[in-house]
Image (cartoon, helix red, strand yellow):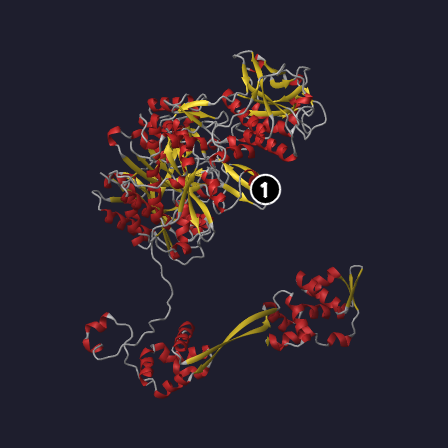
Amino acid sequence: MAENINKILESLSPNEQRILPHLEEKNVTEICKKSNLDKVSVIRSLEYLKNKGLIKISRKQRKIIDVGVNGALYRRKGLPERRLLALLEEKRIIKIEDAEKQSGLSEEEFRASLGALKKKAFIELKNGKIILGAKKEEISKKSPEELFIESLPMEYGSLSEKQQHTLESLKNRKGIIELIDEKTMGIELTSLGKEIMALGLKNKDLIEQITPEMLKKEPLWKGKKFRRYEVSLPLSRISGGKRHFVNQAADYARTVWTQMGFKEMSGDLVVSSFWNFDALFTAQDHPVREMQDTFFLEKKEELPDKKIVKSVKEAHETGVPGSTGWRYKWDEEEAKRLVLRTHTTVLSAQTLAKLKQEELPAKFFAIGKCFRNETVDWSHGFEFNQTEGIVIDSKANFRHLLGYLKAFFTKMGFEKIRFRPGYFPYTEPSVEIDCWYPEKKAWLELGGAGIFRPEVVIPLLGKNVPVLAWGPGFDRMVMDYYNIKDLRELYKNDINQLRKMKFWLKT
Amino acid sequence: MAIVTFSKKQFEKDIGTFDEQMKNKIPMFGTPIEREEKDEISIEVFPNRPDLLSYHGFKRSFLAFLGKKTGLVNYKINKPEENYGVIVDSSVKDIRPYTACAIVRGLQLDDEKIKEIIDIQERLHMTVGRRRKRAAIGIYPLEKIELPITFKAVEPDKIRFIPLEMDKEISGLEILQRHSAGKKYSHLLAGKIKFPIFTDSKGQILSMPPVINSKLTGKITQETRDVFIECSGFDFEILKTCLNIIVTCMADMGGKIYQMELRYGYIKKEKTPDLTPRKMKLSLENANGLLGTNINEKQLKQLLEKMGYNYKNKTAEIPAWRTDILHEVDLIEDVAIAYGYENLSPEIPDISTIGGEDSRETIKRKFSEILSGLGMIEVSNYHLTNKTDQIEKMGLPEKTILTSIRDSKTEYNALRQNLSHFLLKNLSENVDSEYPQKIFEIGKVFQIVSEKVTEEEMLACAFAPGNFTDVKQALEYFFRMLALDSEISFSEPKNPPHWFIEGRTAEIYLNEKNLGFVGEIHPKILKNWRIKMPVALLEIELEEVFKMLIR
């Protein structure tokens, strides 16, 4: 016990030591005066003393009724109705507009006074005139409102029923009454506190902050005690600079892909329909190419290399060897229309067009923004991230595609996934990847993949080589990790949220 | 997205118990379950399989997939009877050049079947028909029609009949102006001097495709036994497949299919429907190669039969209602579906390639590290913005050029031309967060340079509260950490951006190239954004920096 008391004594900060002798004041303002400390320091120190078990603090709340700005004025000058009565006593009958002018009241006060006097049946209004009906003794008596204002301040709890009634009517008038929530603090020494006070506070020699000056002179610290800190005490929060969490996730995905031997692709966000659609064998009358799904710019762009354009056109019109194509007249102008890319698959198409035969086998990936003309809700946005990948290899097959996808999704934290048939105009076979959500007891879609059709590969690469390709959305994975339920939260840039956000810590 | 809904009771009667196993099986056929209700099941049908757009079409294929009725389903096609003909007048050649027609007899229709027929017609219109632009379908009770039929084009004011949902005879032009379907599809006939119509041998108008049928001949009821079906449009092959999808669905309902003779004035005569299967070579080697499987010829045959094909002499016979088989790979996908995606074990091949990040991404991440080290928080804004944020609130002249997006569904309808306005927007939306606030963003902005849209990678930082010294110091630290071969310099700009305070803005130079500006934001701009803190901001282009860092 003695040791414990010693420890407590050594942990008392200078402020705590300063206020301890003045606790009998039981009133923060008084303690402030006596200890010569500001209110915040006193309250904080009281809190610390409470945590150390030296004092007990009880908090009480009282509702106090006091006069407001106008109330204070009326207490001196009389209520407006009293002033109006004085005028009426003199005239007995007076035109309303004359009364307003002569009373010297504001329009609002005047109206309130008329109301109050009518309610008491002191006056009658007839033909635009005020007629005083009340007797002299009635008038000279102080009204309940006047009595009420005079007796302020009062505690709400102590009001009689009548006074409550008066309060209600006065509350409706501007600035007469003010309701104050007064918080009071009861401070009491515990037995431990009393014991310590009895011992006396003699620890003046405790070292507080260590200062550079102190370190220069040994006697200033040698053999002295350091004031003990309350080490388990919660502190106010600080936060630091950091990378945006979606970018942290993208950085991680980059590492996963590069570790699997993939090279990153990059490119423009604004591309021609040629790269976004035509090169990917999406027929020109396909519904996805309509304005309600895609952002079109009011500009056009020249098409690339004539040879590629010609072979893409042929793939659409008559197909490639072994294929019938879409059998329609392909329009070059339609292909020139600029769009905000709707998928990162654009990058795969452009990469295939640049790739040389001797560079095979090759593997590429991308992570980037894509755009769709969508209204925004919790699960849809007009901007979103996709992660793209292609493997170009003469021996590549569908099971390899599933293998890469499984490896990636496992790394992203999705344990139980399933592959089911899907459809995209540019892949065959196509596959959809679902993930099992135990809490929802349902399979949810993560994204699509497939092997590029020969109608895509031959025009771009010059020969038919299997190209495994995928482009699942990326944001869903980020939302999952951060437990975000609404897609809009990803790009809200709420600084509080960003400060709180944990780091992406997957390995 | 096309959804097909059918009764659970019917499904269980025709196909099997709708239990957990079945629920897992249906998506593995390529038709994910969209909804399950007490009495109804809804599945999603992908755009490549319009033949699954009716319950009967789905049932036929799915029974094969389950191994219950495998192989190509054979339908009896009856030769045209007398007068089962359609005269296609050359007047439609430049207006709506093709039609494919059929007659189905002996139907026993109840409300459910009538609904299915109307539904498949509507779904085909929406999908393969491209909202009736490419193909439109009409189905008529045969007892109200005198065969043969004529398909011709006539001046709109000479077309007069009572359209469905109306009680009065009106002209072709009036239909487009006044009828709800007419208004909806008028754009498909816009600019045509003549409108296409189907008439019977008495000259009675059956319909004006692709808009509306006649009230007198255009609606099937429970009493209808025999029907005349026409598909009209621009791609004869598509029309024939559409027709095949409908007649086989009706045959599955118990109808008998009759051909009609199409007497074209400008292409050779033809009889439709024709359900002769298309043939396509399929090599076992290619299938195994693409799928990574090791199946034999016999298994291949079995798998194809599960998907409704026949397979003889290394050749697949393709049902005439399939539109999606363009290439051998399309058959191979069906082989994979029959094999079961769940049975294809994932494998990582032994291919050696060297991975690598895009150098710019590496560098950008380093930039982010440097700035985070200074206590800045990275933000990430949309690439799309709007006039209010980019122009009005930034105090730019009304006429400033915007790169606008057509018909955006949100208020974001222009490409961002700088990051600065977004950082001010961020500060403006965070006035109740604790200060100081230091934020930065690295990202692309768009400019129009000689009529071309260009993309430029930018870096921007904003401090609130902040002054010129704060941000300039940060910028100088940033460049010291990059230790480029040349140093940045500052000078007083001639034309600083509108949002800065004159005399407190510097132009930043690297290799004599202007990278951007650093300065204090003018109170009038802060007022526009309702920011109650002094803000200092910088924005620079990164291209020149990249050039010096990436060799």
Which of A435 and B334 lies nearest the eye of the viewer?
B334
Q: Position of residue B351 (x, y in %)?
A: 26, 38
Q: Tell me: residue A262, above or below residue A213.
A: above
Pointer 1: what residue?
B9
Q: Tell me: residue A327, above or below residue A361.
A: above
Q: Position of residue B255 (x, y in %)?
A: 60, 27
Direction from residue A439 to residue A9 in the image, left or right: left
Q: Secondary structure at mark 1?
A: helix
Direction from residue B100 to residue A451 in the image, left or right: left
Which chain letter goes with mark 1? B
Q: Is residue B461 visible?
A: no
Residue at position x 55%, y 23% in the image? B76
Direction from residue B217 to residue A334 in the image, left or right: left
Q: Position of residue A56 (x, y in %)?
A: 44, 79
Q: Position of residue B336 (x, y in %)?
A: 40, 35
Q: Quadrant of the N terminus of chain A?
A: bottom left
